[in-house]
Amino acid sequence: MTTGSGRWVLLVEDHAIVACDLQRFLDGTGYHVVGVRSPDEALDTIANSQLDGAVLDVKLIGDASPQVADALKAAKIPHIFINGWAVGPIPERCRERPLLNNPYDYHSLLDALNGAMADKSNP
């Protein structure tokens, strides 16, 4: 399994159980995970931290995912989206990055995140 090699990753997930599970997995692969649950925390972290990548829930409460995605793009932070709901529309501004729909497995998540960070020319 490919490791995070000490890279810093922002995890933006508003469902605590999912966030804990993903953080535990990513920590175990060598990533340093900064986990936040709200869009405001995410925007503050993006503005004030050195991040190598991000995993963003595409359907944050309050439909704030596009705003967070815009901040990640402006900061040139490669990111991927996860979607815990296998149905429903995906915001237009969130369609240009990799998206993992539920159910997804850990290996797919890791491959997508590593791929996004390897292609830094397209944050």
Image (cartoon, rainbow, N blue to C red):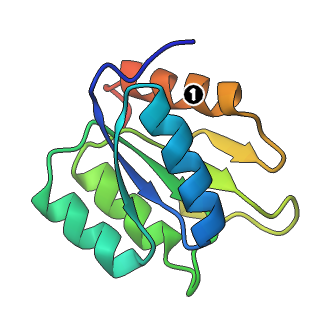
Q: Is residue 119 visible?
A: no
Return the residue at label 1.
110
Give the residue displayed 62% in from the left and 34% down from the top: 109
Say which quarter of the image contains residue 42. bottom left
Asked if 8 appears above or below 43 in the picture, the reply is: above
Can you give x and y, in whole percent of width and height, for residue 107 in the image?
67, 24
Decide if residue 93 is on the left or right side of residue 87: left
Q: Which residue is depicted at the point 51% across and 56% down?
A: 56
User: For the point 71% across and 63% down, which residue is it?
Assistant: 90
Q: Amino acid at mark 1?
A: Leu
SS at circle 1: helix
Q: Nearer the viewer, residue 23 or 44?
A: 23
**How many other residues sit within 10 Å of disc 1, few (<14), some (14-19) or many (≥20)?**
some
Residue 103, placed above or below residue 108:
below
Which percent across, then down, holds residue 9? 35, 43
Placement of the C terminus among the 4 image quadrants: top left
Which residue is at the far bottom? 62
In which quadrant is the N terminus drawn?
top right
Question: Measured from the top left, where is residue 101 in percent x and y?
Answer: 77, 48
- In the picture, measured across the screen, residue 75 lies left or right of residue 97, that is left
- Farthest top residue? 1
User: Is residue 76 visible to us here?
Assistant: yes
Q: Who is closer to the viewer here, 1 or 120?
A: 1
Q: Is residue 9 above or below residue 45?
A: above
Q: Is residue 51 left or right of residue 4?
A: left
